[in-house]
Amino acid sequence: MKHAAMAHSAHVDTFCLENLPPADLWPERRFDRVPELAYPARLNCAAELLDAAVAAGHGDRPVFHFPGGHWTYHDLLVRANRIANVLVHSIGLVPGNRVLLRGFNNPMMAACWFGIVKAGGVVVCTMPMLRTRELEAIADKAEVSIAFTDHRIAAECRQAMATHANGAPRARSRVVEFGADVPHSLELMMVHQPPTFANCDTSAEDIALIAFTSGTTGEGKGTMHAHRDVMAITDCFPRYVLKPGADDVFCGSPPFAFTFGLGGLVLFPMRVGASAALLEQASPPQLLDGIVNFRATTVFTAPTAYRAMCAQLAGRDLSSLRHCVSAGEALPRATFDAWLAATGIRIIDGIGATEMLHIFISAAGDDIRPGSTGRVVPGYEARVVDADGKPVPPGTVGRLAVRGPTGCRYLHNLERQRAYVRDGWNLTGDSYLCDADGHFWYQARTDDMIISSGYNISGPEVEGALLLHPAVQECAVVGLPDEERGQIVSAFVVLRDASARSDALARDLQAFVKREIAPYKYPRRVTFVDALPRTATGKLQRFRLREEHRA
C-alpha cells in the first residue's frame, strides 16, 4: 500500500511505509488540542530529545545513573553518535531498516536506541525474557536483519536471527553484542568511529519504532509509531499531569521494550533535562533500594509492585519520593490506600496501550479520585461507547474509545486494524464508565488478555506452548482474580492419559512453558479436567471457565 507520506520520507527501505494499514483505516490523529503538538514536518525524535538537550546547555547534567556511576547527556550523545556511525559505515544500515534491540535497562541499551533512531533506523525493542521462538516471530514480522543484543543473553538472539520461525535459514542477518570487551563487540566497533554524526533528516511521519504487544490470538502484533508520536507522548501526560522538573530523578521497573518503561525511564526525563536511575533487575526490594540509593523522586511501576513494597518499607528512607505512577493493569483501591497510608503519597494511576504508545487517561494531586483511572490527558479525547460506537450517558458501562496525537497503526494486520479502529477512534479493549465529572472508572477487559503483575499475557499463546507437551490433549488458559497480581494465568488441561494426573506433572507443565516462552507467562495454576466447555460448533468457551472458577 503506497502512502502520500512516501514522497517526503527519508526511508530508503520502505518496508514500514508499505506495511502501514491503508490510510482510511487509520485513527484520526489530532495535533491541535495543545500547542506543544505543532511539530515541524522534518523531525528526528532522537535529535530533539538528545542533541537539543546538549545544545540547550544540559551536556554536563546527569542523564542516567546506575550502580557505580552515571552518564551525562554529553556522554550519551557521544556514544549514540558512535553507534549511529557503526550502523551506517560498518554495518551498512540504510534509513528504514529495522534493528532488533535486546537487553536490560542500562545506559548502553538507551545509547543503542538513540543511535538507531539517529541513523534513521527503526527500533524493534524486545524484552530480555523472550525466548528464541518468540524472537524469531518478531524478527519475521518486522523483517529484521540487524540485531543488537546484550552479550549475556546473546545466544537466543543469535539462534533467532539464524533461522525463521519455520526453520528456514535467515539470509544476511547480523548480530552485534554489547556490554563486554569481546571480539567484534559493539564497544570495540565504536572506538574507531567519530563522536559526531549527521542525524538522518527524517520526516515527522517516518516510523521510529515498532513496539510488539501480545494479542488475544496469541500472536505478537507490531504497532508502528512515528517520530512525531514519540515526541507527542513527552508533551502530553508528563507535561500536563506529572509535571516533572530538571532536578527530578526517575526510577522504575518496566523494561524499555514496554512503552510504559521507554517513556517513564528514558523519554519523559530527557524531555525536561532530568535524569533516571536505571536498574537491570527491579523486583520490589531492588526497586526500593534503587529509590533510596539514587534519591529518586519519581517512580514508574505496576500495582502489584506497590502492594508488595508496602510490606518492605521498614528501615528505608523514601523521603526523596514525590510522584508514583502506576499503569499496566487496573490499580485496586486497596493498593492505593495501603501505599498512601505507608508513604503519604497518592499514586498517579493511568491507562495507556502499546497501540497508543503511552498514557492517555490519568490524574494527579487533588484531581485524583481513588479507584478512578483519572480524566483525559490534555491532547487526547476519550469517551465510552456502546456496541455500535455511539457515546453512552454518564455512569453507563461501555467500551473505551480514545483519539489524540497518537493512535493504532498495526504492522501488516488489517484484521486487527479494523477491529481496533472504528470511525477514527481507537477501541482499547477495556470496559469503562465515565461519571458526570469526566472521571473514568475501569470495569474489566473486553477480550481474553490476561493482565498479571502489569504484564499483558495472551491466553492462547500459553495454550500453544502447553499443547507442545506430549501429555497434553487440549487446554484452555484464562486469567482468574488474584489479590496480589490482579490476575493469575490459570490453565485447564485435558490429558491424553487421565490417569497421569499428579502434582508432579503439573509442575512439569509449568517448567515446560517457561522453556518455550517468556517465564512470566507460565500458568501459576494448573487444573486437570475431563473436558473443556465448548459451543455446539466446537468453539472454546473461556468465559465459562472464568465464571465457574472465579472464586
Image (cartoon, rainbow, N blue to C red):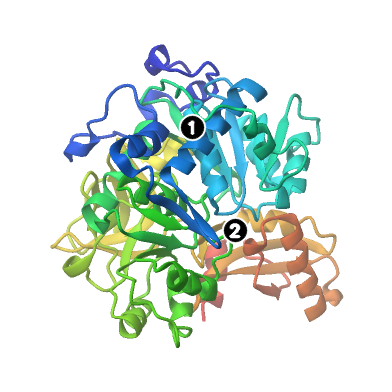
Q: Residue furthest left?
A: 437
Nearest to viewer (mark 1 / mark 2): 1
Q: Residue furthest bottom?
A: 314
Q: Is residue 413 visible?
A: no
Cα separation, mark 1 vs mark 2, equals 33 Å
Which amino acid, mark 2? Gly
Q: Nearer the viewer, residue 107 or 202?
A: 107
Q: Position of residue 465 (x, y in %)?
A: 72, 56
Left or right? Give the position of 388 relative to 281: left
Left or right? Give the position of 462 relative to 360: right
Pointer 1: residues within 10 angstroms few (<14), some, or many (20+)?
A: many
Q: Position of residue 300 (x, y in %)?
A: 41, 62
Residue receiving disc 2: 459
Q: Nearer the viewer, residue 73 or 257?
A: 73
Residue 333 to residue 315: above or below = above
- Asked if disc 1 and disc 2 are in contact, CB closer than 8 Å, the reply is no
Count up the numbered dots: 2
- Quarter of the figure with residue 82: top right
Q: Is residue 9 visible?
A: yes
Q: Residue furthest front?
A: 60
Which amino acid, mark 1? Val
Residue at figure coordinates x 73%, y 46% from the top left: 154
Residue receiving disc 1: 117
- Quarter of the figure with residue 466: bottom right
